[in-house]
Image (cartoon, rainbow, N blue to C red):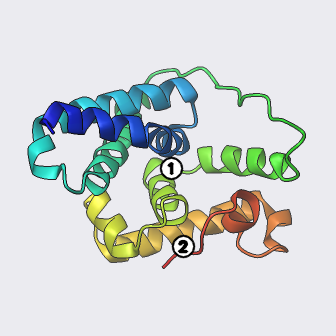
Amino acid sequence: MSDRDSFEEYVAARRSALLRTAYLLTGSHADAEDLVQVALVKVVPHWKRIADRPDPYVRKVLARESISRWRRRRWLEIPAHRLPEVSVEAPDAERRVALWRALGSLPPRQRAVIVLRYYEDLTEKETAWVLGIAVGTVKSQARDGLARLRELLPDLEADGDPLSAAAGARRPR
């Protein structure tokens, strides 16, 4: 199989997961699509080296590019994004929307740590590697991010961990 075929197969298989992660990092479907596109463009030159295990490298590019984009754009006026209409068929749809809004209010690094730890189910060490920060920083960012989410979503606290209760995320390792 050629490198091109291998890359195309990876993108086809992992596109929805990459978009989900990017959406959680950006809070916008359009920005998520752009972020995934930029990340994939940056990954292509390194494909031969990472083809056997590309997910950690792609996550690293997504997270770092998301933070870099936020830093570049924070001085610009950014229109507020509305969340998409949510089906009322899902019993926890309102809770997920509330969680997404709260997640969107976190600073980019805290948000990236929360997304990688609780949605992508990475360890503290893996999260630190992806973001290029110390494990202690991951711990403090996760602690502070969860504390902020608990402030914003006190009704979820009664059900346990707000992330797992509202979004069905796995417990961190």
Q: Secondary structure at mark 1?
A: loop
- Dot label at residue 56: none
Question: Which label belongs to residue 107?
Answer: 1
Whether residue 105 is visible: no
The residue carrying mark 2 is: 143
**170 or 153: nearer the eye?**
170
Amino acid identity at mark 1:
Pro
- Up-down relation of residue 18 to residue 28 (above or below): below
Name the residue rendered at 64%, 62% in the picture.
148
Is there CB contact under 8 Å for labels 2 and 1? no
User: Which of these two is toward me, 148 or 165?
Assistant: 165
The image shows residue 32, relative to residue 25, as above or below, that is above
Residue that lies at the very extreme toward the front in this rendered image: 1
- Indicate the position of residue 11 as horizontal and vertical percent values: 35, 36
Q: State whether residue 117 is above or below residue 31.
A: below
Residue pictured at 39% horizontal, 35% vertical? 12
